[in-house]
Image (tube, rainbow, N blue to C red):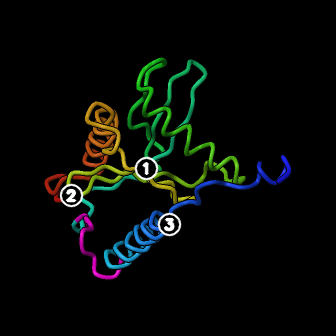
């Protein structure tokens, strides 16, 4: 034997039992995934929720660094986020605005902030279809969006004439 053939020769081949065990494990994993997908066994589904309230809003950066959130229907300001505050909300809005910019979509189409019957809050970009589930980021991050939806609700209630006002 030459030095070259000695180097290529392995004294112990890889155990075939290990190869069969690995193949069996991979096959088992694929079968379990298929069974779960076809039968919904082991899957978690959120119950169907209905929207409690939904508000179409626009966001505008101001020269002083604040962000004014306005009703898309009336154009009236709903709430302003002061400069240097509400970093999470600003980040979410900036991300949605970046997606619009990449797709060359203007700011004419509003965003929809929705409160759901199961307690979730979502912010959906009606232009791109992208949706952010605010609750996924924890309770402290939800506060700003709760304030926004409460401000939108009170503005909406103030804009609607009461039954007493319409009869006079």
Residue stretch rendered in magenta on the structure: 37-46
**Residue for badge 3:** 19
| Residue that lies at the very extreme toward the bottom in this rendered image | 38
The tag earlier along the polypeptide, 1 or 2, is 1
**Labels 1 & 3 near each other (Cβ < 8 A):** no
Residue labelled with disc 2: 166
Earlier in the chain: of badge 1 and badge 3, it is 3
Q: Main secondary structure of the magenta part?
A: loop
Q: Which residue is mark 1?
A: 132
Q: Is residue 6 above or below residue 68?
A: below
Cα gap from disc 3 to disc 2, whole angstroms = 81 Å
Above-or-below relation of 143 to 155: above
Tags 3 and 2 touching, CB below 8 Å: no
> Residue 12 falls in which quadrant of the image?
bottom right
Residue 44: quarter of image: bottom left
Numbered disc 3: secondary structure: helix
Counting from the top left corner in percent of width and height, residue 6 is at 77, 50
Q: Residue at x 66, y 50 (%)?
A: 106
Please state which of residues 128 and 1 is positioned toward the viewer in this rendering: 1
């Amino acid at each position: 034997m030459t030095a070259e053939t000695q180097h290529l020769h392995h004294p112990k081949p890889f155990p075939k039992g290990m190869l069969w065990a690995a193949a069996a494990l991979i096959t088992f994993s694929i079968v379990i995934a298929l069974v779960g997908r076809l039968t919904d066994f082991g899957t978690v589904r959120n119950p169907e929720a209905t929207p409690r309230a939904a508000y179409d809003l626009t966001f505008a950066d101001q020269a002083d660094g604040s962000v004014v959130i306005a009703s898309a229907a009336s154009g009236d300001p709903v709430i302003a986020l002061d400069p240097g505050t509400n970093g999470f909300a600003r980040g979410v809005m900036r991300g949605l605005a970046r997606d619009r910019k990449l797709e060359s979509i203007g700011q004419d189409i509003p965003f929809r902030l929705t409160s759901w019957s199961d307690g979730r809050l979502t912010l959906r970009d009606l232009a791109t279809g992208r949706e952010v589930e605010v609750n996924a980021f924890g309770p402290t991050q939800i506060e700003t969006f709760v304030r926004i939806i409460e401000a939108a609700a009170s503005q909406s209630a103030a804009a609607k004439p009461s039954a007493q006002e319409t009869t006079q």
